[in-house]
Structure formats: C-alpha cells, structure tokens
Amino acid sequence: MFNRPNSPEPASGLSRLLLIGGGVAITVLIAAALLLFNLGQRQGRIQVSQEQQATAEAMAVTMTAVAQQLLVQPTATPSDTPAPPTNTPTSAAVAVAPTDTPLAEATDTPAAVDTSIDTPTPADTATATPVPPTDTATPPPPTDTPTTAPPTDTATPVPSTFTPTVVALPSVIPSPTPSWTPSATWTPSATPSITPTPTEPITQEDVDAASESGLPLNAVRFPRLGAQLIRNLPAEQRTPQAVFDLLKPLAESEDLLLASLAYTPLTGNRWAVLAVPRTAQGQPMPTLFWDSGNQILGQAIFPFVATAPDATPLITGAAEALISTDAQGRIIVLILERAGPTDMIAAYALTAQPGEPFTGVWRSGDEPLWTAQTMGSSLQLLPSANNSRLPGIQITSPLPADAPLRGQLDTPAGFVEHPSLAQQNARSFWAPSLATSENGPDRWIYELDDAALLPTPLTTLARFVASLQAGDAEAAAALAVSPALATTAQELGLAQPGEWIGLYRDRESGALLPVTAISTRLRFFDNADRTRTFDAFFSEITGGDYLISEIRETENYGAIDLVTPAPTRTPTPTPTPTETPTQTPTETPTETP
C-alpha cells in the first residue's frame, strides 16, 4: 500500500545525494539550535515565556517534517509518459515490512534505510519538474523513538515546484532571543559605623547619678551613653533620622522602648533633640540631647517636668519644641506636650548656662489659669510683643467646669459641662516674662497676658436661661431674634431650675455631632427630668455671636438612651422622725431581812 502509482523515474544519484545531504544538514542545525536554546534557558541566560517556547518547538517540528519530506520527495523525469507502477520503493524511501505482514505485528527493530545510489541516467542531467505524488502516506516511525507532538501552528506547505538547490525555510525562533538585563541594585545610604554596646559596664558615676536623682539606673545611663554616640557622629551626618537610628538600639540595650512619636527634633539656633523612652513598666523618661557649644550633652529631665513621682509627662512626645538663647547667653528650651491620655496639655520651660545641665524654671501644671484641655484644644506658638527670642503660647480650648478662669471671664453657669458634652470655649495668650528672684538669678516664666470667652450657641443659651431664672425677661429677649421668644420660653418652663445638658446636632438631619463640633442646633434637656427636652436653633450675627431663633419641644431621652457623666437625680423621700417612747422607771420593792 506504499506504492506510488504513476511515479516518475528516479532522479540521478547526484541530485538525490544533494537532497539527502541538505535534509540531514537542516535537521542537524535545527537540533543544535534547540539544544543551545534549552541549555541557555536552564542557565538563566535566556528568559522567554511559555508561549514563545511552545512556538519555537512547534516550528522546529515543522522544519523537521519539511526535511523528511525533502528526503522522501521523488524527482520527476522529463518524459511525459508516467512510469509504470511498481511495488519496489525508491532508493530514498524507507523500507517497510512486507505487505503480507500485518502492521500491528511489526517487530521493534527499526526499518532499514536504503542508502544505495542508482547509476545516473541521462535523464538525471535534465532539470526535474516534480509531479505531486498521489499517495501521501508516510512510513511509520521506529517504535523506540518517541513520537514528537504535533505542532500547534499550521505547517508551511511545500511548494509544488522547486529547484533542488534552493530551499526556503522559516526561522526556527520566531522572535529575537531575549537578553538578560540586570535590574537596578539598591545601594543603602551611608550609615554611621558607631553601634551601641549592650554590655557597657555600669560606672560609679551612673550609680551616684541614679541615687541623687531618684531615677532608675537605665534612665541615667541612657543620656550619658547616647551623648557619647552622638558626639562621635560627624556634624554633617547628625540628622534627626541618623540620631534616632543610634538612640533606638541603645534604648533597647538598656531595657527601654523608644518610639518614633516620642522623638522630636527641636527648632531654634542650635542642635537639640528630645527623646522620651519608656521603662518596662510604661514610665516615660524624657531625655534632652543638645549642643552646648563645645560638646554634645545628654540629660534626663523627668524631675523638672513631672509633678509627682508617678506622673507620666510627655508620654506621647512633644507637639512642638524649640531651643533659643537669651541676651545673657542662657540656653532656653520650650516644650509643648502632644495631646495624650492626661486631662490637660502641659508646657515646660528649662534654662541652662553653656556647658551646664538644664534646670526647670516653669511648667503649666503650676498655673491655675492654664486651660489647655486635652480634648478640643489647640496650642500655637506666636510672636510675643515683649520678647523677640521666645514665642508666646496661644490656647484655644473648652473651659473645664472647675477652671478658675471661668470666674475671670464672667462665664455663665447653669449647664453641666464635660468633654463629652457641649462646652463653652475660651482663648488665652501666655507671654514669656523674666521673673526676678531674691535667692537666685532671674528666670524665664510664662504669664497669662490676655483671655476672652469665645461666642458659642451654648454661651448664648446659658445666658438666656440664666436671665429667665433671674426674672430678667428683657435681658433674655436681647439674646433672641424675636423678643416674643422669651415669653415662649417661660411657657415651656425654662425659668425653672434644672440640671441642663447640651449636645450639638446637625441643623438639617438632627444627627448627633462629635463633641468638638459646633452647630446652630443644640439639643438640651434637664438631666433630673428628661421629659423637659428641647431643640434650640440659632442665627449667627455680625461679629460671630449667636442669637436664638427658635425653641421647640422634642422627643425625650430615656434613662438608657443617653448615659451622661452627670447621674440622673432621683428624689429620695425624707424619713419622718418617730418619737421614742419614754420609759418610766418602776420602783423595785426593797426586801427587809
């Protein structure tokens, strides 16, 4: 069944030899290219995708098939008479088993290839015009050779006519071979070679300093060792980040924890940083490092900023800190605390002579008029009129209920004020001042220079209710858009005393607002009798003040709907005293012996 009917006469030996040699050469080149390609891929020199690799292998298989076709392709004779059919395969064909042997029973021995060359005939010298064979069957491959998977791409068809010496072949690799390009290498920035020594021996100086200051031993060693590390760092490399990278591992070696938020570079005319590491028990240990003029010094400042041994000053670090020098050459440091878990935001001032340690000269905790409440306060450093070297401190803050400043500002009472409720606000300005001392040198302190009560809806409402309760309807009417509103409020019972609590709400939706927000709608109620619940609406007038435009009753707060810091007052019955019966002594008879 492998006979080729109407096949032309065999080509000359020389032409067949050229065809065989060309096919073998093409096959060898393809195999070599694939071998080099796979070897380069394994070594990582060539990186291609799976799709590119599959395409290359498919085209290689296609080229192999083309080469095999060239090997078995017969050449035509110039004669127009077709050759008689014969069962003998051509010399370039692969011999197969006899036709009477079933193909399924063929042995594993590969079929022999007839490599004999026929004697050239005169017909071989003519240019052959190939005639496509009618039988396209191909001999079975040897069973020992694994079958190559069919190519995924459509093979390029062999032209029906060709010149034996010219064969057009597609490229084995469809795309240029990718070359490996090294990625950019990250170069670390220069880091100081100084590293803290965890096993730094404890000196007698450390023991004496800890005993004198009452501080833990590690809180005394941290400023001393830190100053040594910073001293060895060149001045041009003494950046805030570089110093932090030195102090953080040092703190860990001393069983301290230094967070980035507790590390603050100081602004001013000389280099300084504030580091606040914590002990294992959570106690902050504020430490100051500064350039004293001829060397770097370090000092624990806890004794100057703490108001009690268990206090936690600067536990969240500093919001602002600056360093300056006065006309006498003294170094001055001002530190504003970052808002934290304490009720008030504190400020501290320290002074030092060049080359000497600092001394605390002022702290806000000692000032009764200081009103920097943690929630809702803002502190700013502003230029001071009487001092060009130190700034003033401006505080905008809610007024605590027990603040002595309320009395100086004529703040209306009558409402329960708390950080979780509506509060009245004040603005104060603290200016630096040089205080004289009989027993020592003058020192820089801060004094209250100016203060004012800020207009808020709560302030207007508190004055309105206070006027009604005092029976001053005219003063109450002056706080309303319409004078008739004072009469309406009296009818609603606002002239009666109550434990009033206010909460700001959105004017349109009525939604409860954050405690630090202010709006023109305020819900207020009597915490002792929550059936007395009202909504007050306000209009802002020129100058930022507020007038009441409407007051109306609204839904009541239940006992569990709103829990306030002020407990609901419950009436307690007054016990009625009961008379104790008077016992009349009875005479005991006397026995006469």
Image (tube, grey):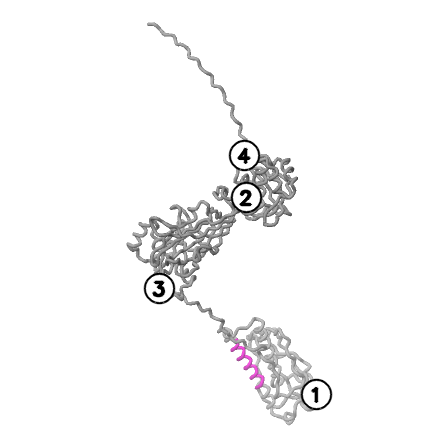
| Distance CA(mark 1)–CA(mark 4) | 125 Å
| Distance CA(mark 2)–CA(mark 4) | 18 Å
Which of labels 2 and 3 is toward the front?
2
Viewer can see residue 278: no
Q: Are marks 2 and 4 in contact (CB under 8 Å)?
A: no
Percent position (x, y) of residue 251? 38, 56
Q: Which residue is mark 1?
A: 82
Residue 421's tag is 2
The quarter in which the N terminus is drawn is bottom right
Bin the neighbour count of mark 3 within 10 Å (Cα to Cα): few under 14, some 14-19, many 20 and up: few
Q: Earlier in the sequence, mark 1 or mark 4?
A: 1
Q: Earlier in the sequence, mark 1 or mark 3?
A: 1
Q: Is residue 95 above or below residue 441?
A: below
Choose top left, top right, bottom left or bottom right for residue 221.
Answer: bottom left
Percent position (x, y) of residue 505? 60, 46
Q: Which residue is mark 3?
A: 232
Secondary structure of the residue carrying numbered label 3: loop
64 or 39: which is nearer to us? 39
Which residues make up the magenta segment? 21-37
Q: Would residue 27 be counted in the magenta stretch?
A: yes
**Three-letter code for the amino acid on which mark 1 is drawn:** Pro
Percent position (x, y) of residue 451? 50, 48
Bin the neighbour count of mark 2 within 10 Å (Cα to Cα): few under 14, some 14-19, many 20 and up: some
Q: Horizontal placement of 294 versus 502: left or right? A: left
**Three-letter code for the amino acid on which mark 3 is drawn:** Asn
